[in-house]
Amino acid sequence: MAGARPYRNPIYAADIRELGGVVSVHTSRDRCDGAPVFRVGHISGGGDVAFLSLPIMLEDHAAAAARVLAEFVGCSADVQKSDAGLPRETSDAEIAGGAK
């Protein structure tokens, strides 16, 4: 069993507060019953650090987690009510990172 490799430039807790970037809440579906689940994501300002939470069952809890994470990493979270209960298709523009 190989041991963990140290990174050249480790990230310390004090560095996390200066990451900035974007925090968002993603809507997904549970694999078993298709119920809507929510995940909190963060991408740092430089794009080199990314995070995606485990599924969160309640949208209000995911929004609260996103606000806390945004405050912690030093960025703003734009959390809006989703249409998780409504089926919809993802447009090509959304996939390419364009319009929402």
Image: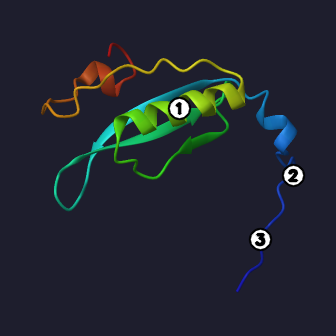
- Per the image, the residue denoted by label 3 is 4
Q: Nearer the viewer, residue 81 or 24?
A: 81
- Rendered position, 6 above or below 66: below
Q: Tag 3: residue type? A: Ala
Q: Position of residue 4 (x, y in %)?
A: 77, 71
Residue 97 falls in which quadrant of the image? top left
Q: Tag 1: residue type? A: Ala
> Residue farthest to the left?
87
Choose mark 1 or mark 2, whichever is in front: 1
Q: CA distance from mark 1 to mark 2?
A: 29 Å
Choose mark 2 or mark 3, whichever is in front: 3
Q: Disc 2, disc 3: CB below 8 Å?
A: no
Q: Which sits earlier in the primary sequence, circle 1 or circle 2?
A: 2
User: Residue drawn at (44%, 21%), measured in percent from left and top?
Assistant: 79
- Per the image, the residue denoted by label 1 is 66
- Rendered position, 42 above or below 53: above
Looking at the image, residue 24 sits to the left or right of residue 70; the answer is: left
Q: Which sits earlier in the primary sequence, circle 1 or circle 3?
A: 3
